[in-house]
Amino acid sequence: MILFGIDLGGTKIEGAAIDSGRPGEPLCRLRVPTGGDLGYDHIVGQVAKLVAEMEKASGKSRPAAIGFGTPGTLDPDTRLLKNSNTTCLNGRPLQRDLAAALKVEARLQNDANCFALAEATLGAARGRPVVVGLILGTGVGGGIVVDGRALEGRHGIAGEWGHNPLRGEDTPCYCGRRGCVETVFSGPALERFYRARSGRELRLPEIVARAKGGDEDALATLARLRDKFGEAIAAVINILDPDAIVIGGGVGNIDLLYSEEARAAIQRSMFNPVCRTEILKPALGDSAGVFGAAMLTFNPPARP
Ligand SMILES: [Zn+2]
């Protein structure tokens, strides 16, 4: 079976044609610039152009359904896109317009859900029944996959743990609330914490490197990450009790998150004396977006 997956990013739109029998070797992988500043119709046109190029490069006709990873989420009630940082997509019927432009069924889910779906079906958490995929980078997002199906949820926000509040935190968040996970241990939040203590403006990888050299402010930044991560992950585990949690994004590269120390921090807020949940690094790298989008072919919408 031939699958087409498209990852609609803020700067580029990437597409892959995949043979479901050999998902590790895509038939083609192509990209075009998004050109978000040229507006909504331009983006839909770019996708149509990309799909025509994918047919040519793969030698396969487009399948009856194409999966799309999008910035933002399709609102289950209005069927309009929302919460996208490519702002010209917000409030637009992107699913309907892509389906009309491409003459296929368009399956849309947000990019964090596609990441989770790819890692749960083809990547690090392959074979685990209940998987949470978290993006921990500039922003914080997440998706939940149960038996190979990415959950959408009543409001289309299943897995959005980045805007859960943390105890004792009060930093204002762009979402209008305070003390969200995203304001505490996203990459920029950790960099802000380090700068406030040390007066030095450093990027996260440098802060991690300095911690190895004994920099006390860097060590305090990582201790904060460990403790707050533990509290936030325990909330996910107490409610969903997943088999595995895969952590993508720049902050997800920090080895501390996979250590016994971090596991102890999780257990401090967890409703069980031991934590057996696997905490995994992603296996698919940059490919997770398009692979997850392609896997939406097997993920019919819960509310058609
Ligand atoms: Zn928030």
Image (cartoon, rainbow, N blue to C red):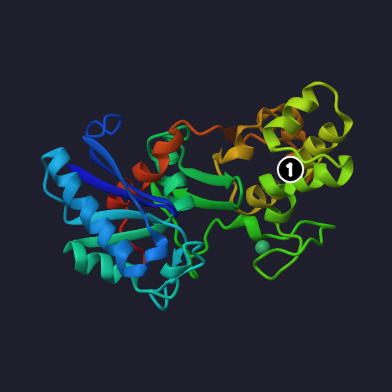
Q: In this view, does 128 lie to the left or right of 217?
A: left
Question: Does the Cβ of the disc 1 residue fall within 8 Å of ligand 1?
Answer: no
Q: Disc 1 residue type?
A: Gly
Measured as percent of width and height from the top left, residue 49 is found at 21, 54
Residue sitting at x 71%, y 47%: 185
Measured as percent of width and height from the top left, residue 207 is found at 75, 33
Numbered marks: total? 1
Residue sitting at x 82%, y 39%: 200
Classify mark 1: helix, strand or loop. helix
Q: Quadrant of ligand 1?
A: bottom right
Residues 45 and 181: in front is: 45
Measured as percent of width and height from the top left, residue 285 is found at 46, 34
Residues 169 and 40: in front is: 40
Residue beneath disc 1: 230
Splitting the image into 4 quarters, where does residue 194 fall? top right
Q: On screen, 52 above or below 223?
A: below
Residues 265 and 136: in front is: 136
Q: Which residue occupies the extreme bottom position in the image?
A: 78
